[in-house]
Amino acid sequence: MNYLTRIKSFLRASRGNGTEPPPLRPHVRPGLSFRPSFADLHVARAMLQTKLPTELVLHILEFAQYWPCQVFTMERECQVYASSWSSFGKICFDVEVLPESGLRSFREENVKVKAVEFHITSYEHGWTQGPYSTSSWLEVSILRKENPRAQSLPDQSTVSRPLISNSQPLQELFQDPQDDGHGWIVVERPALAAHYPQADEDARAWYLQGNKVADRRPRTHTVLWSVFSDECKGNEGAGSGQGFLDELRAGDRLVVWARAKWAGWTCYVSELEITISYGV
């Protein structure tokens, strides 16, 4: 069944017995490289609305995944080594979730993140059983500014810390939104999104991708978290991202961490690209 046939079926169902039509299933065309801009989306909506009701137009655009997106690329390699602490992490990359330029173009509409795709090249140095039963991984946090006067995040190349309750400088930065020098909080993940080896830690990050153990060759992984749950993808070492997209708000920042849990473990990240797709 081609695309137009599906739309005609949808229209017939809508005019039939008055019941709600079945939800449209997204159809992804492999190798599609075109990425619409916010302006492209406005033009497409305006063209379709000359002949179709707004509700149907939104269904069509959602079905086609005609979503504007932004691509962010890490500019330098990141490495973390667990030495004297039992759990260590370093910021690899941080990006703004919803760009102001896109929000302004949608005026009063509620812009949402529809998908986040991570393209990662990394490896580890450690030993254990099972290809992804690892103590070297990447995870992602959502940072939210509670105080409009909050300072910027520290330079990502200088933040390397043990993940304990009184660590500096990030923990201080997140603690007190009333203090002019602080004002960022970390959004907690749902309990069901916990993933080994995060189980004994605070729920401050979503597990993103584990490094394959006993393999010093860089491995490339793609992890996709989408509003269409059956479109999410990743290997056995990828996190599910449960509840992640639901938590994102305008003004939030994504922070990707390189992690090494036990002494002697290392996490090397040589490439990281994040693609964020938006819709209404």
Image: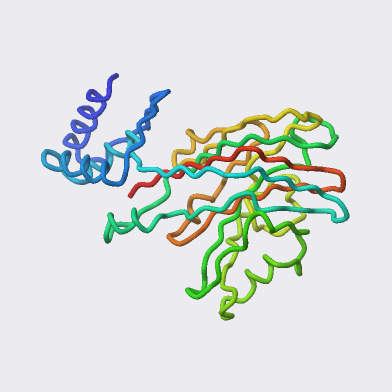
Coordinates of residue 123 in the picture (x, y in percent): 72, 35
Q: Residue at x 51, y 41 (%)?
A: 225
In the image, is 212 to the left or to the right of 111? right
Tell me which corner region of the image, top left, top right, bottom left or bottom right, holds residue 160: bottom right
Q: Residue furthest top?
A: 1
Coordinates of residue 255 in the picture (x, y in percent): 59, 53
Q: Residue at x 77, y 53 (%)?
A: 88
Q: Is residue 11 above or below residue 152?
A: above
Q: Is residue 15 above or below residue 142?
A: above
In the image, is 23 to the left or to the right of 211? left
Coordinates of residue 132 in the picture (x, y in percent): 74, 33
Towards the viewer: 88 or 75: 75
Tell me which corner region of the image, top left, top right, bottom left or bottom right, holds residue 152: bottom right
Towards the viewer: 229 or 220: 220
Q: How many marks?
A: 0
Q: Residue at x 78, y 59 (%)?
A: 162
Towards the viewer: 154 or 113: 154
Q: Residue furthest left?
A: 50
Q: Is residue 263 above or below residue 149?
A: above
Image quadrant containing the N terminus:
top left
Coordinates of residue 97 in the picture (x, y in percent): 47, 54
Q: Residue at x 19, y 33 (%)?
A: 11
Judging from the image, the colouring scheme is: rainbow
In the image, is 113 to the left or to the right of 55? right
